[in-house]
Image (cartoon, helix red, strand yellow):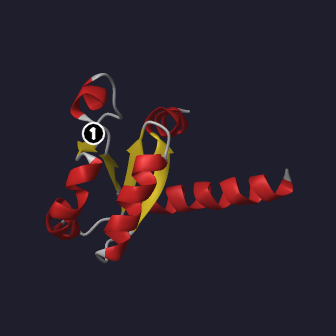
Amino acid sequence: MGLFSNFFGKKQRKLDDFFSRDAVIIDVRSKAEYDSGAIPGSKHIPVQNIAAQATTIKKWNKPVICVCASGGRSATAAAVLRSKGIEAMNGGGWLSLYKKMIT
């Protein structure tokens, strides 16, 4: 259990740091998924469009937290953005992150 609590503690500290610097949340799910529920204020950019939108995202000059349904697509999106020089992290599943934000 110690290993997991250390991992999740680091992720929480990184999330806190990103939020303190006015991070942008990008939801990379499909339009239908996004329309069925999303974090208020999040931006919707499907994972397949992330690379094409990297120049625009970089101009925001803010850290980015990518979310999806469970964390798989958001991990891919965050990796793509980091490869383009954007400070990005995988926020995991959108609903889980949202619940952390409102408590």
* Quadrant in the picture for residue 89: bottom left
- Left or right of residue 20: residue 59: left
Callout 1: helix, strand or loop? loop
| Relative side of 90 to 31, left or right | right
Q: Local crowd at mark 1 within 10 Å, few (<14), some, or many (≥20)?
A: few
Query: Which residue position holds label 1?
Result: 41
Quadrant of image for the C terminus: top right
Label 1 is placed on what type of residue? Gly
Looking at the image, residue 45 sits to the left or right of residue 1; the answer is: left
Q: Residue at x 16, y 62 (%)?
A: 52
**Residue 82 in picture, x, y percent from top left:** 37, 71
**Above-or-below relation of 45 to 3:** above
- Up/down of 34 relative to 74, above or below: above
Where 5 falls versus 97 (above or below)? below
At x 54%, y 62%, the residue is 14
At 21% across and 66% down in the image, what residue appears?
A: 54
Where in the figure is residue 23, as x and y percent of width and height?
Answer: 36, 57
Measured from the top left, where is residue 92 in percent x and y?
A: 50, 46
Horizontal side of residue 63 vs 91, given as left or right: left
Question: What is the x, y in percent for residue 46?
Answer: 25, 45
Residue that extends furthest to the top in the rendered view of this protein: 36
